[in-house]
Amino acid sequence: MTDATTVLTGDGQPAGPGQRDSYLNHGKGVLSWLFTLDHKRIGIMYLAVILASFFLGGVFAMFIRTELLTPGQTIMTADTYNKMFTLHGAVMIFLFIIPGIPATLGNFVLPLMLGAKDVALPRLNLASFWLWLIGASVAVASIIIGAVDTGWTFYTPYSTTTGTAVVAMTLGAFILGFSSIFTGLNFIVTIHKMRPEGMTWFRMPLFLWGIYSTAIIQVLATPVLGITLLLLIAERTLGVGIFDPALGGDPVLYQHFFWFYSHPAVYIMILPAMAIMSEVISVFSGKHIFGYRFIAWSSIAIALLSFLVWGHHMFTSGQSSLTNMIFSALTFSVAIPSAVKVFNWLATMYKGSIRLAAPMLYALSFLFLFAIGGLTGLFLGSLSTDIHLHDTYFVVAHFHYVMFGGTVIAFLAGIHYWWPKIFGRMYSERWAQVSALLIFVGFNLTFFTQFVMGSHGMPRRYYNYLERFTAYHQASTVGSFILMIGFLIMAGYLLHSLVRGERAPANPWGGATLEWETASPPPYFNFEHEMQAGDPYDLDALSWDPSIKGYVRRDPSSVLAAPRGAD
């Protein structure tokens, strides 16, 4: 028998001495965290600072929506409004969404899924975290120096002439790019070199396929953004004529450079989200994932096609008609592997034993919201309709349905799915369901109204608007406050779980991937045995044990290769 405070291993037995030495208790000083090489602690530190960035970006968003409650000035001037929407976009994109899932859940979960002690390059992992801190500090410091008002894309020629702190903000983004590259390199090497016995490429969990595809984009595309921002800094500081027509430059060249990175960056954001969906939907449907190889290959296809579609952001920039047609056709093609994933997830759910726990609620939200985001993207990929909808609130709504309705919702699903493994505590399921409902309702009220506004001609980024758009803006603002309440409730029950949450068993959900074979939270070195891999979606190998309120493997020896340290 075990009591409520006993740490349990994957087979439901009390943990041994090494497993009780949780990474959370392995050196409690601040410096032991700041200079740790443990991937789990680095993931936790990333989680803390990235959630802080999300809070900061959310504050800017609430100021924006409050200002747009009425036509004319409500709470701020036009110049302040320009700075607010720029900071909201820059913080959310560069500090939160791009590093969000890979740096937090990727860092924590990837080595555990491999049955490994750590990532392949722990020091590079720590360096990437410190680079993120430095880059984020420089970017946030720019707010004090003189908040940028260019929009988060820093488009020339305005970004080369404005008196705001463009150099500081873009320098911060430049440094953040190195953090992203280091993380991607680390994950690629780790997946290539540290897979356990039995884990061939097509026996990897699909989460690893998603992270691997993301890492490829991080390594290949991020240097282009770095060079572009460095050229912008050089033009502002040295007067080099790269983008300034007066000096022989071309401002449209900046758009080509920027979007050659930033459209693949959309998939840096969405591929890890899709990877989470494959894990959550299979487990909470109680079924083997449907179409494993199709989902795996679709991740690679998305990564490759993402480099070929940047020009659809520039249909109105003066490109030739032939170029526009080519980019339009390529844009439609990238929807195919995304649709492959969605149909395979739906097939996984078909006739499944679906449990509506919080992670699954967010997965269902993802399917609904991401489908809307993807389908509305067809209007923007089509030349005839894009001309009318370009730079309207339709684009704002589409972008948020993909990025928030896709990436952020999936991030929330992943946080709730792996929270018991990360901290060894269960959260309140009832409050989690209330929060998920508020976030779903608030999000749709906030952004679906913007599709209507945009189709009626309401331009984005405008401080003022015509009276006929007032009702739409007010509904959108009310939705944003409902959304905020949902997140505040979430913060409350997750923080409460850290103090008073019920102890989590090793496998509370019934997942068959290797991270569920170690204690919750994991010991410092993750596993006491060398692990071997079987089918990561063989849920029939597990059974529910009511005495520990968790799942156990019917044959624990099936995943154990040898004791750690043995030859």
Image: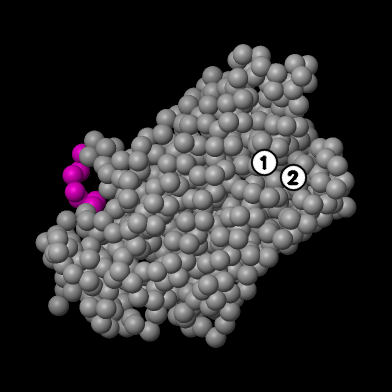
In percent of the image, x 62 and y 13: which residue is there?
238
Residue 256 visible within the image: yes
Q: Pointer 2: residues within 10 angstroms few (<14), some, or many (20+)?
A: many
Query: Is 308 one of the magenta-colored residues?
Result: no
**Residue 459 in the figure: left or right of residue 35:** right
Cα–Cα span, label 1 and label 2: 7 Å
The residue at which mark 2 appears reads as 311
174 is higher (above) or lower (below) than 25: above
Mark 2, secondary structure of its residue:
helix
In percent of the image, x 22 and y 71: which residue is there?
561
**Residue 557 in the figure: left or right of residue 379:** left
Tag 1–tag 2 contact (CB < 8 Å): yes
Task: Name the kind of residue labelled 2 in the image.
Answer: Gly
In percent of the image, x 18 and y 69: which residue is there?
562
The residue at which mark 1 appears reads as 259
Task: Name the kind of residue labelled 1 in the image.
Answer: Trp
What x and y, as percent, mark residue 456?
Answer: 85, 50
Q: How many marks?
A: 2
Q: Nearer the viewer, residue 456 or 231?
A: 231
Q: Which residues are magenta?
A: 23-30
**Residue 496 in the figure: left or right of residue 405:** left
N-terminal-most mark, 1 or 2: 1
Residue 421 visible within the image: no
Give the label on residue 313, or none. Answer: none
What x and y, as percent, mark residue 282?
Answer: 48, 74
